[in-house]
Amino acid sequence: MSCDQCREREAVIHLTQIVNEQVTTLHLCERCAAEKGVESPGAVAKTPLGSFLAAMGKGLPEPATTPRSGDTCPRCGGSLQDFRESGRLGCPECYHAFELPLRDLLRRLHGSTHHVGERYAERGPETVRIPERASELREQLRLAVETENFELAAELRDRLRVLE
Amino acid sequence: MIDLSLLTDGGVGWLDASGPSSHLVLSTRIRLARNLAAHIFQARNSETEREEILGNVERAARETVLLRRAICFRLDRLDRIERQLLHERHLVSKELAGLDPDGRVRSGASILIQDRIGVMLNEEDHLRIQGLHSGFALEAAYAEVDRLDSELGQRLAFAFHPEFGYLTSCPTNVGTGLRASVLIHLPGLVLTKEISKVLQGLAQVGLTFRGLYGEGSEVVGNFFQLSNQTTLGSSEHELLDHLGKMVRQVMDYEEQARQVLLRDAPAIIEDKVWRAYGLLRYARSLSFEEAMNLLSGVRLGVGVGLIPDVGMYTLNKLLVHTQPAHLSVAEGVSPTEPDLPIRRARFVRKVLESEVGRRG
């Protein structure tokens, strides 16, 4: 993508502004951004996620395993720099590759790094957990009755009978 | 042209105003972000990989109870107007439909829909499991989505981390992957100028608001989409409880604001809602924004009992069918047709006449 200003150099800074609920995005090269008084970390900081991203990994104690911006994820080849620019990770493995800075980011975003909701147990095709499924079905049946979704309730009851 | 009649209620069962608190809440949406462990995320994956994802998920979906009869729309094979139609029905995000100004439709972008539930595929995450219910119905909508999630999870390997939970392309969604949103009409708070205080208060308790079409959309017709901001560190039911409590509080504030308006400025309010009704009933040209704002006025009038003969369902139908893509398809003209506002006004008159014409 070329710079919105000079239309020559590659845009490396993507500045999203919200003014009067109107969202505009400017794509600028480094030089034009500097002329506009926007420095790259500052530009990133203007997006809600951006201030977190910009601060990510900074001011932290730096253990030997802290990834540098240039380090890439062994699986997808994405770097921390890519993530800072796009706000998107490349693959599930990125959560391991960039664990330290991400942990810090998650804490700031969500106030926690610990998932306490439903757990997904990896299942092979043969390992459907019958007892747990029955309890799931019972819970769903309760909800279906509560919400007066009787068609669903009847179906759930039939499925429970088969399981039990 | 895609055949939306294949969908139950044309995919707009959510606007039938049958759900709880329908006079204030138009709809409740729940979505769960999920990714397949075996594939890299959308930002870095290839066309071939997206086709595989689509194939795998569709096969799994055909084995489930909730999606076995699902209709699949491949957005990458639809015209812009058709994609816009699906977006206006709130069935696909703007991003997936490729409707952003410089946006293109990503190859493999698709949606599976059956009744009130569906899955967006190859969106920012591989799967966005979603359910859309009429009125204020967080738990009921979640129960259904949760059920589909477990049905799909038994057949597909989702990316899950023991500490971080469900892994998503953007860390703002990680953990539960749950975003619950309630589309609520708040004209009382807007008129009493209390709205910014309320929205600021919501931000402080971890909730966020968006416009009529969700992420990145503007507020029109005094409709606000309220949703949870965080997805990690609380369970699904805690997130829903918290949002539910706050929405109930906002509903109370809105009712109070309406009472204040009726008590302190009855003549002004009465004039405002009837003026909105009069314009909708007799105007000869209406832009979409104007129609939305007038519909908001009439909705307020119906809500406080000043306008007796118009149903919420009629107002909801008008909300959907006066949108640019819906109107231009119904009228058989291009969405850029210059006389669309004239056609919109004629359409609104016809609907209102048939509903209340006999009585006045």
Image (cartoon, rainbow, N blue to C red):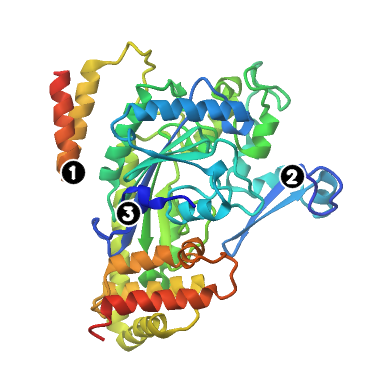
Q: What residue type is labelled 1?
A: Asn
Q: Where is residue A64 in the image (x, y as percent from the top left)?
A: 66, 16
Q: Mark 3 lies on which chain?
A: B
Q: Mark 2 points at which residue?
A: A13
Q: Do labels 1 and 3 share a chain?
A: no
Say if A67 sits above or below B177 in the image.
above
Q: Residue A149 carries which label?
A: 1
Q: Which chain carries label 2?
A: A
Say if A68 sits above or below B98 in the image.
above
* Residue at image point 30% right, 50% down: B244
Q: Using a 10 Å C-alpha cutoff, classify the residue at mark 3 as few (fewer than 14 neighbours), some (14 to 19) or many (20 or more).
A: many
Q: Where is residue B239 in the image (x, y as percent from the top left)?
A: 35, 41
Q: Residue A69 carries which label?
A: none
Q: Helix, strand or loop at disc 2?
A: strand
| Horizontal side of residue B315 vs A56, given as left or right | left
Residue B294 in view of the camera = no
Q: Position of residue A135 (x, y in %)?
A: 20, 24
CA distance separating discs 1 and 2: 51 Å
| Horizontal side of residue A86 vs B163, given as left or right | right
Q: Name the residue under label 3.
A: B14
Q: Mark 1 lies on which chain?
A: A
- In this orientation, which residue lies closer to the viewer: B76 or A93? B76
State which tag comes first along the sequence, 1 or 2: 2
Q: What residue type is labelled 2?
A: Ile
* Residue at image point 40% right, 75% down: B348
| Horizontal side of residue B273 vs A163, given as left or right | right
Q: What residue type is labelled 3?
A: Trp
Q: Using a 10 Å C-alpha cutoff, classify the residue at mark 2 as few (fewer than 14 neighbours), some (14 to 19) or many (20 or more).
A: many
